[in-house]
Amino acid sequence: MNWNNAFYLVIPVFLIRYLYVHWKSREKLAALDFFPPAKGMEKAGKATYLVVNTFLLFYPLFLKLEGGPVTFSSGFVMYCSGILLYFRSINDFVSGNGLISDGTYRHSRNPQSVSFILIYTGIALVTRSLIYFILTLILLWAFNQLAKSEERYCMERYGQSYADYLRYTRRFL
């Protein structure tokens, strides 16, 4: 077994996203797959997200861990921070009802997106993959487009409560 394969870094994402959420709340598993209606560039953002995120999840099958001491260490810290944030934000999501504004959602309206950027940037550093890093930047743009359609949807659904939440909580950081 080759422990140098970078795909091992993606396995926790699948375990959290599918096994943990399935165990905690089957209804929330379906909610994680929901995309609100998109307009204009948001449609391109959604398509970009679907393609690029899928590629970023499976491309590590072909990558090896090979960063130097500084890039590997900083990448691994970033990756671990992203995994922890992903677990916490997923847990906050499946534990909450209605407008979720507690836990990680108190600091970011999109903590799962932030966690993916940390995870993928960490993987790009520990594998020294410029392609992976560039695709992570493209994914950041896609997340921004998706957030616009989600915000419009939440504004229609939650009204003034969401408007207040928008005032006090940043989109990403």
Image (cartoon, rainbow, N blue to C red):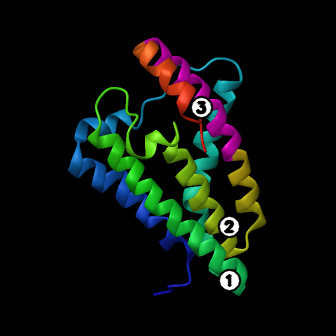
Give the number of the disc on residue 85: none
Dot 1: element: loop
Q: Left or right of 150: which side holds 49?
A: right
Mark positioned earlier in the residue sequence (1 or 3) = 1
Give the magenta part as a residue range: 139-156
* Residue bearing the label numbered 3: 146
Question: Residue 13 appears in which quarter of the rendering?
Answer: bottom left
Q: Residues within 10 Å of mark 3 (few under 14, many from 20)?
A: many
Q: According to the image, label 2 marks what residue?
A: 124
Task: Answer whether residue 36 is visible to the viewer in this image.
Answer: no
Report the Cα–Cα distance between label 3 and label 2.
Answer: 23 Å
Mark 2 or mark 1, which is nearer the start of the sequence?
1
Q: CB of mark 1 within 8 Å of CB of mark 3? A: no
Q: What is the secondary structure assignment of the residue under circle 2?
A: helix
Helix or strand or loop: what does disc 3 sit on?
Answer: helix
- Viewport quadrant of the N terminus: bottom left
